[in-house]
Image (cartoon, helix red, strand yellow):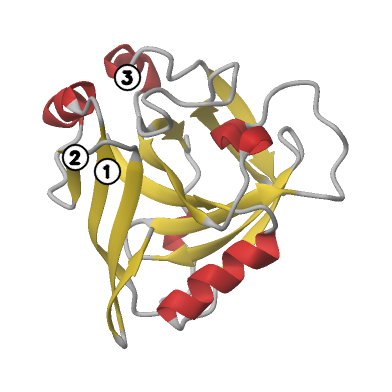
Amino acid sequence: MTLDHIAIAAETLEQGVDYVETALSVPMAGGGKHRLFGTHNRLLGLGDIYLEVIAVDPLASAVPHCRWFDLDRFCGPPRLTNWICKTNEAATDLPYALAGTGPMVEVSRGDLIWHITVPENGCLPLDGCAPALIDWGDVPSPANSLPNQGCRLRKLKITHPNPYELTQFLMVSLKDTRVIVEHSEQPSFEVEIDTPWGLKCLR
């Protein structure tokens, strides 16, 4: 399993894109619409991974199920809400995922098709601090085709009142020194990103 991407949720896509572009001083690119969940996104390459801004698409038809990343209940300013790990062997890796991570569902954006874990209630375990698992199959990750803006992830810090389960997951399934889990009173995410204009932070 490897780190695939990090997600920032927003009430509108425009607000989320403005938050990232203002903070990092680089333009976002790519993205599109996800018909299954009535959402749309924009992306920013971070080398071997990418950053995603995602929001409910106001032009999409209503969906008969909960949206992924708990977007049905999202409110407030744009902020980091989720992280996603890539698996090439879902059947092998799913048993090691945290309880409640959800089944794999097929999602598409344009011609791109992949599988990702989505809980029935839309909210990943540990208040969203547990990672979703994504399987791109034979399709390359979007990180491979995004413009190189000179940005790279230095650190992803995840904090939670009960970090033990997440720490165990990292020890067993994900060997990435950029990902750090710490104890805190409230769940939170923070990323440090090296940019052409120095180190920047997103929360």
Coordinates of residue 9 in the picture (x, y in percent): 56, 50
Crowdedness near tag 1: few (<14), some (14–19) or many (≥20) residues, C-alpha within 10 Å: many
SS type, badge 2: strand
- Which amino acid does the dot numbered 3 rest on? Ala
Mark 1 or 3, which is nearer the eye? 1
Mark 2 or 3, which is nearer the eye? 2
Which residue is pictured at 73% across the width and 21% down the height?
65
Between 44 and 144, the one lying in front of the other is: 44
User: Does 62 sit left or right of 24 as displayed?
Assistant: right
SS type, badge 3: loop
Labelled pair 2, 1 in contact (Cβ < 8 Å): yes
Which residue is pictured at 58% across the width and 25% down the height?
122
Between 142 and 164, the one lying in front of the other is: 164
Between 163 and 58, the one lying in front of the other is: 163
Which residue is pictured at 57% across the width and 57% down the height?
77
> Image height check: is 96 above or below 117?
above
Q: Which residue is tagged 1?
A: 158
Coordinates of residue 55 in the picture (x, y in percent): 66, 50
Coordinates of residue 115 in the picture (x, y in percent): 53, 30
Labelled pair 2, 3 in contact (Cβ < 8 Å): no
Between 199 and 75, the one lying in front of the other is: 75
Q: Which label was assigned to residue 97?
A: 3
C-alpha gap between disc 2 and disc 3 = 16 Å
Crowdedness near tag 3: few (<14), some (14–19) or many (≥20) residues, C-alpha within 10 Å: many
SS type, badge 1: strand
The quadrant holding residue 95 is: top left
Q: Which residue is tagged 2?
A: 181
- Which amino acid does the dot numbered 1 rest on? Ile
C-alpha gap between disc 2 and disc 1 = 5 Å
Instruction: Return the disc, 2 or 3, that comes first in the chain's sequence.
Output: 3
